[in-house]
Image (cartoon, coloured by chain):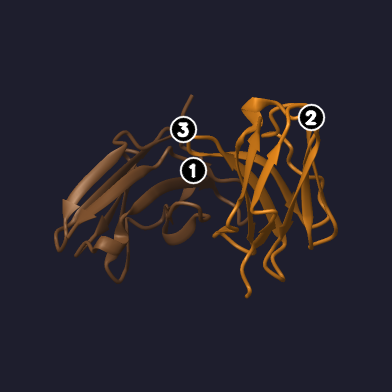
Amino acid sequence: DQQVKQNSPSLSVQEGRISILNCDYTNSMFDYFLWYKKYPAEGPTFLISISSIKDKNEDGRFTVFLNKSAKHLSLHIVPSQPGDSAVYFCAAKPAGANSKLTFGKGITLSVRP
Amino acid sequence: GAGVSQSPSNKVTEKGKDVELRCDPISGHTALYWYRQRLGQGLEFLIYFQGNSAPDKSGLPSDRFSAERTGESVSTLTIQRTQQEDSAVYLCASSHGETQYFGPGTRLLVL
């Protein structure tokens, strides 16, 4: 049973436009959510996170939105750049600083020049 | 560099052999995690160390898998009698708070 779901395996957007990556979760114990970006042959790189007490967190071109009632979060990248092309993983964890992450399967973002 | 490091970066082995993977966490990080990513899949939790507490081994797929950590330092993940389904990227992460930081991974191929 997948507790974190990224239902779209891929997304292609034009450079300069907005990329919206979606993620759904089923476990109501999840309290903290993270997005990681992964290039081929590299480990995941932390991008942005959000706590369940917030509904939005912004960092430069990246904004994460959390809808707790819908158990849904999304990552917005605007404007999208070709260097953003990578696999993006959504991850979630229960409350508590040190606890395991549950990951989605990832979505491959391609930004066309 | 202050990031998480892992060795070897690539490992090819024959079915039935044992392998040992190493992780050096970020200095000062109290928690260390092992995950693996099989082809086309997300990251799958294996084991987690937190200080001197007993490790959380709930993600280990079989008793062929084991891991050790020396204090808050290096960790080794050992896979005994490797099988072809063990082929994956094995990722280590460390944290001192909510965010986990990952190493580059060890790509294991079992022939």
Sequence-wise, the earlier of marks 1 and 3 is: 3
**Cα–Cα span, label 2 and label 3:** 26 Å
Q: Which chain is rendered brown in the image?
A: A
Q: Is residue A30 above or below residue A55?
A: above
Q: Position of residue A38 (x, y in %)?
A: 44, 53
Residue at image mark 3:
A3
Nearer to us of marks 2 and 1 is: 2
Q: Is residue B68 left or right of residue A48?
A: right
Query: Looking at the image, do the residues carrying marks 1 and 3 touch, with CB atoms under 8 Å apart?
Result: yes
- The residue under the point 33% across, 45% down is A108
- Mark 3 lies on a secondary structure that is loop
**Cα–Cα span, label 1 and label 3:** 10 Å
Q: Is residue B95 above or below residue B76?
A: below
Q: Is residue A113 left or right of residue A39?
A: left
Q: Nearer the viewer, residue B50 or B13?
A: B13
Q: Position of residue B91 (x, y in %)?
A: 61, 49
Residue at image mark 1:
A30
Residue at image mark 2:
B64
Q: Position of residue A96 (x, y in %)?
A: 60, 53
Q: Name the amino acid, label 2.
A: Arg
Badge 2 and badge 1 in a common chain: no
- Mark 1 lies on a secondary structure that is strand
Q: Name the amino acid, label 1.
A: Phe
